[in-house]
Structure formats: C-alpha cells, structure tokens
Image (tube, rainbow, N blue to C red):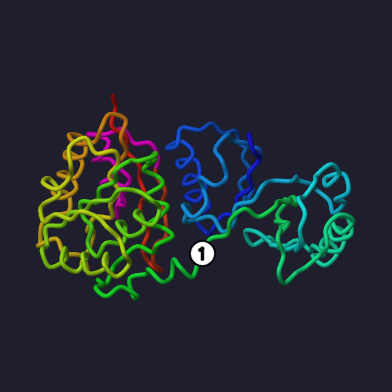
Amino acid sequence: MSDLLFELVGPNYGLAESEILARIEGLSFDFTKIQTDKGILALKTDCPAEKFSQRLGLTHRLLYLIGITSDEDFFDLMEGYDLSEGNVAIRTRKIGGHEAETDTKNIKEQLGKIISEKNPIDLDSPEHEIFVLISKDLYVGKKVHERDKKALRSREVKNRPYSSPISLKPKLTRALINLARPGRGDRIHDPFCGTGGILIEGSKMGFEMSGGDKDEKMIEGCRENLEEFDVDASLKVGDVSETIPQNIDCITTDPPYGRASSTSKEDLSSIYERLFSSAQQRLKKNGHLSVIFPENKYVEMGKKYLELIEKHKVRVHRSLDRYFCVFKKGE
C-alpha cells in the first residue's frame, strides 16, 4: 500500500476527488482516505502511482505523501524518510484559496536545512521535488507526476482543424471518461461524438475508442480531428440507438443540449430517452454510462433505466451549470 497525495484542480473539488476514486474502482484496487481538505486528497491505496500518471484531468500534481503536520516543525515528520540520491528542490503551494499567513520562506528554509544534510538543494534542475501544500494543515509530498497543461490546451476545440461552438475542455473530458470507471483493455463509446473531443482524450489515455453521430458532416470533421492528433477510433454515422456496440464496457458522452447544438429540432427528452434505453440494452453487466445533462429532470429520467451512482453540479461556462452523472447497469 502507498500513501498518495493529490493536489486537485478547482473549483469543482468534489468532481476532482470523484474522478480519482472512480479511476481506482475501474482498476479494481482498494483505497482508504487518510485526509481530505479543500483542494487536497490523501489516500492509502494499493493502486500503483503510475496508474494515475497522465490519466487524470482534474489533478494538478500527484505526490507520494511524506506526512501531514499542523505546524512548521518538520524535523519529526522528515525523520526516517530517506530520499534516493540526487538534487532536491522544495516548492510550496497555497491550496484552495487558503489565506492564512504562512511564512513560505521559512518552510523552505526549514525543510532545506533538514534535507541538505543528505541531498544537495538545486532549484533549477532537481532530480526530486518536495512540495508543501498549504491549507488548514501542511501536506508534504514528493512529486510523482504533474499535469501537462500545455498538452491539454493544444487539444482544445480552438486548436482543432474542425470545430463547433460548444465543446468540453480536455481536463473535464478526462474527468468524464474516468467517471465511467474504465478498466484495463476496456472499450469506450461516445454516441454523440461531435468533433471528437472524448475520442481524442480517451485514446491519449490508452483506451479503445469508438464514436457515432447522426450528422455525416460532423463525422467527417471528427475524422479530420482524429487524424490531426494521431488518434485511431472507429466512427459510424447513425442515431444514438444505432451506433452503440453490443456489450460495450463504457459509454461516455456529452449529448446535445441547447441552441448551439444540432438536434434537428427534436425534443431533448426524446433524444435522451433513446440514449438511456440503448445504454440499458447494450452496456455489459456492471458497465457504466458517464454523461452530462443541462437539467436535473433528465437525471431523473435516467433512473428509470439505470442505477444513478453519482451526480455533480458543475459550472462549465460563465452562466451555465451542467450535471455530470454516472449510471450503472445492474447484473
């Protein structure tokens, strides 16, 4: 078992935490919460740290947890902790809008004095980075992985050859995919694939992806985007009731929901009804549907077909709240 420390992306900390726990569940590992704080999650888990690397969308950094302290005396906390050979940098981060007066310079000096007895300090080219996450308590950890914000931004809708007015940001797309609890070798289908955002991120995360859309022009544009980002995914033109493969592991989708989306003037309730009905028929036993809805009434609709596992109200745009939901097909 390892003690892991996650620095979460705000402001939707509940969604960020759920993404992590869903990832662990999908891989069939166990966990126990050590401590949570605004913007911070500490876990004891048998899930290897590398299983999280490059997969999470709403985690700034993943660290091995060294310890948690309520004051700035790090001697007892660091006693017995042995870094491997190499240069070390010490960083501090105030988390979740924490406003208490904390002397970050003093923290770095104290830790630096303890660590420098065995490892040289090098802020520019360190082989190890020790972070102190500052909230109600001080969380000390060794960095394992840091989110590649530049890579995520490079795949935003504005940077795709073919685009539409509405598209989920890559970081939220990854969270939505992880909420579906995909395991090793699982297949994920998006029946409203649009410009391909879910297919692109899912493929970059290492999953086998497929997509469908009833708009042939949209499928052509999606294929152009997949080629741009060197992504291989099968595509099919057709209604949501037609494109979902039988016995699919996971369905992850951001269906049409408003004026900027193409619904061919069809009522949203009818579209969502077919989504739930098709998911009920074609998901494998214990398979999951992760989906986003504009109103809670559609979440209630889904409960007629599948078991609602979790729901998160998320501010996606300045004046738009949406519901990130996870449904499960029973045995």
Say which quadrant the C terminus sits in: top left
Please provide percent x and percent y for residue 190: 24, 51
Residue to which mark 1 is pinned:
148
Q: Quarter of the image holding residue 245?
A: top left
Say which quadrant the N terminus sits in: top right
| For residue 232, above or below residue 51 | below
Q: Which residues are magenta?
A: 289-310
In the image, what residue occupies the spot 10% across and 62% down? 265
In the image, what residue occupies the spot 27% across and 72% down? 165
| For residue 41, above or below residue 288 | below
Please provide percent x and percent y for residue 189: 25, 48
Please provide percent x and percent y for residue 39: 60, 54
In the image, what residue occupies the spot 44% across and 66% down? 152
Of the pair 308 and 196, the residue shown nearer to us: 196
In the rendered structure, does residue 302 fall within the stretch colored magenta? yes
Q: Quarter of the image holding residue 77?
A: top right
